[in-house]
Image: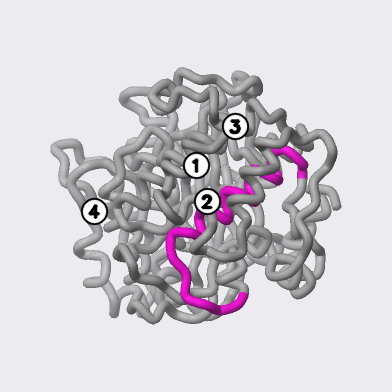
Amino acid sequence: MSREERKKRYDAFLEALTKQAQEEEGKDAKEQKFTQLIPSEEKVTLRDFLLKKVLGRGSFGKVMLVRKKDNQKYYAMKILKKESVIARNQVEHTKAERKILQQLQHPFLMTLRYAFQSSAKLYLVLDFYQGGELFFHLKMMKRFTEQTARVYVGEIALALGYLHSLDVIYRDLKPENILLDPQGHVCLTDFGLAKEVSEGDQTNSFCGTPEYLAPEIVAGKPHDKAVDWWSLGILLYELTVGIPPYYSQNIDVMYQKIEKGVLRFPPFLSEPCKELIIDLLNRNPANRCGSRDDVEDIKAHAFFADVDWNLMMEKKILPDYQPEVRGDQAALFDSEFTREKVQDTFVQASTLVNRNAAAFEDFSFQQGIGIGVNNDSGNGEQTQSNGLATISQEPDTTGA
């Protein structure tokens, strides 16, 4: 099954979503009033940025390439509609996400630079990664060499290990949520499904991307940090083979394969690569690689035998594939979005938003560490960003 066929499953949904979002757009952005979200001597508003391109669109808003007028630097601006956040009961989830992300300081995790709001929208200005999504490159390359996959998976493992050290489960690893810088280093983004879970505790949400769901999630069982290591195994397989190991166009069949299917390998994979995938895709979470000593289990695996982890953390190990960065900053992003009209239109705050105005009063923090879009709809609804849909069903029993 090709990557194109995998993506087509969501085209109809994306088309309907884009049409709905465009119909909601109203007057020009200059009529908006802005409130600062990050305590700073520099009061930043939308007027401080030039809007360049649309990079992606989701159920809560869109992501745009912008350039700050004073320093001429490029950023990615996420624009979230308060009404959508409130209507989908995502205010508390969004606050929880902010709480998680303001703790983060890591070379392979997204950074937030500015945040502000109008009466109807939230604006998050993040670092821009010109290399685009890993999904974009995998679609072009079909598959990567083991050397390139080793760097990608190693850097992501370090990021996941850091999150786990903060008692955070990521829960939405996939190529669409991994960005590349011009040298080919990764950045994990979109923390909408991330959740704080104390050591020894578990959570029960049915959430994630179908191809990457761990069997304990598919079975509706409580889960913990081990689900991230399962997803890392799926990612390593997809990067080196070209398609997830249990993929099927029929989601029910795919879930059956995740729980009981045979793991098959093409002949060109090395034994250490196959062994790591097998160890990560152990259906017993207690015996899964990463469940005993977290990221240290992965670092000690034979697949990474020649890796100097200090050099990897310092971004001194380069993959043998680098994005072909061009003059057009958005050249490596999906043209389905970059062709859209560039505007941030005025949306009058609805009665729903006005009634819940206090919900966003404490939406601020000290240091500029990233916030992402929450894709957990809380009611089983599918949401979409740039690539595949992310699903979330059943509220967490832990109270999120």
Q: Secondary structure at mark 2?
A: loop
- Residue at 47% of width from left, 75% of height from top? 222
Whole-number angstrom distance, CA of label 2 to CA of label 3 = 16 Å
Q: CA distance from mark 1 to mark 3?
A: 11 Å
Residue 322, placed above or below residue 110? above
Earlier in the chain: of badge 4 and badge 3, it is 4
At label 4, which amino acid type do we have?
A: Thr
Give the residue pinned by disc 4. Answer: 35
Q: Amino acid at mark 2?
A: Cys
Mark 1 vs mark 4: give the one in front.
1
Task: Report the magenta residues as a range.
Answer: 219-242
Give the CA separation, mark 1 to mark 4.
44 Å
Front residue (pair 14, 248) = 248
| Residue 289, disc | 2
Q: Which mark is residue 150?
A: 3
Is residue 247 magenta-colored?
Answer: no
Q: Amino acid at mark 3?
A: Arg
Q: Quadrant of the C terminus?
A: bottom left
Above or below: residue 130 compared with residue 351: above
User: Do residues under tags 4 and 3 come within 8 Å of each other at their CB atoms?
Assistant: no
Residue 225 lies within the magenta run: yes
Q: Residue at x 60, y 33 (%)?
A: 303
Instruction: Say whether residue 6 is left or right of residue 24.
Output: right
Contact (Cβ within 8 Å) of mark 1 with mark 4: no
Q: Is the residue under label 1 in contact with that under label 2 (CB below 8 Å)?
A: yes
Residue at image mark 1? 298
* Real-space Cα separation, disc 2 to disc 1, in angstroms: 7 Å
Which-is-in-front pick, marks 4 and 3?
3
Q: Residue at x 63, y 55 (%)?
A: 281
